[in-house]
Amino acid sequence: MKKLIMLALLLASVRLAGAEETKSFRLRSSSLPWQAMELPGVPKGVQQRVLHDQKDKKLISAIVKFPKGYREPRHYHTTCGHSLYILKGRLHSPEGDLTPGMFIYSAINERHGPFTAMEETELLFYTDGPFDFIVEDTNPVSK
């Protein structure tokens, strides 16, 4: 129940960030198709279900899925910060494991990662500006 409340609060904050929208909506995330996420310099394998794509401000909310063993390299963003809320699974990071119920905010220009999926992991992802992805570490080997 706590996880559902936290998720509802986070989604409510996402709606506030997109207050200029002209029409409210709701959806069942499980009805959305998984789409491949492809970023230059990042290994393939990550998928997403896009919940909200505010194209005029270049903000996005999505459920992101890392397959077991996936390693996202150390990176940073020059045009946005982003929020992660772990829904299921476990990601290993230099600061310790990220498990369901954990929330992380990564500020603009702050290096973070690498992240390794110790099991299939799903997370709620939200950007607070146009999303860019600058790879600092190109070692694709999983730990």
Image (tube, helix red, strand yellow):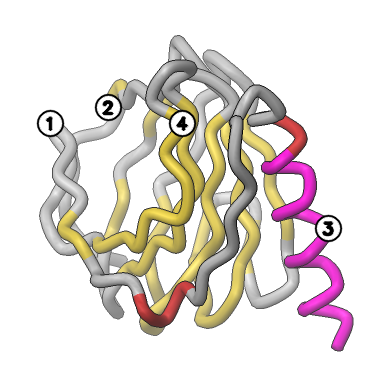
User: Which residue occupies the extreme front position in the image?
Assistant: 23
Q: Residues within 10 Å of mark 1 (few under 14, many from 20)?
A: few
Q: Nearer the viewer, mark 3 or mark 1?
A: 3
Q: Secondary structure at mark 4?
A: strand
Residue 137: quarter of image: top left
Q: Position of residue 118 (x, y in %)?
A: 41, 78
The magenta segment is: 1-15
Query: CB atoms at circles 4 and 1 under 8 Å apart?
Result: no
Please name the residue that numbered disc 3 is placed on: 9
- Which mark is in front, 4 or 2? 4
What amino acid type should be assigned to the residue bearing mark 4? Gln
Please, what is the three-letter code of the amino acid marked with disc 1? Pro
Disc 4: CA contacts within 10 A as few (<14), some (14-19) or many (>=20): some
| Residue 49 within the magenta-colored segment of the rendering | no
Q: Residue at x 62, y 33 (%)?
A: 106
How far apart are the two marked residues, 3 and 4, measured between alpha carbons?
19 Å
Residue 115's tag is none
Q: Nearer the viewer, mark 3 or mark 2?
A: 3
Task: Give the foreground label among 3 and 4.
Answer: 4
Q: Which mark is residue 135?
A: 2
Query: What distance separates the C-alpha of mark 4 from that of mark 2?
Result: 25 Å
CA–CA distance in space, label 4 to label 1: 22 Å
- Mark 2 residue element: strand
Q: In the rendered image, which residue does mark 4 sit on?
A: 54
Amino acid type of the residue tagged 2 in the rendering: Val
Q: Tell me the residue at 25%/71% (across/down).
A: 33
Q: Are marks 1 and 2 in contact (CB under 8 Å)?
A: yes
Looking at the image, tell me whether mark 4 or mark 2 is earlier in sequence order: 4
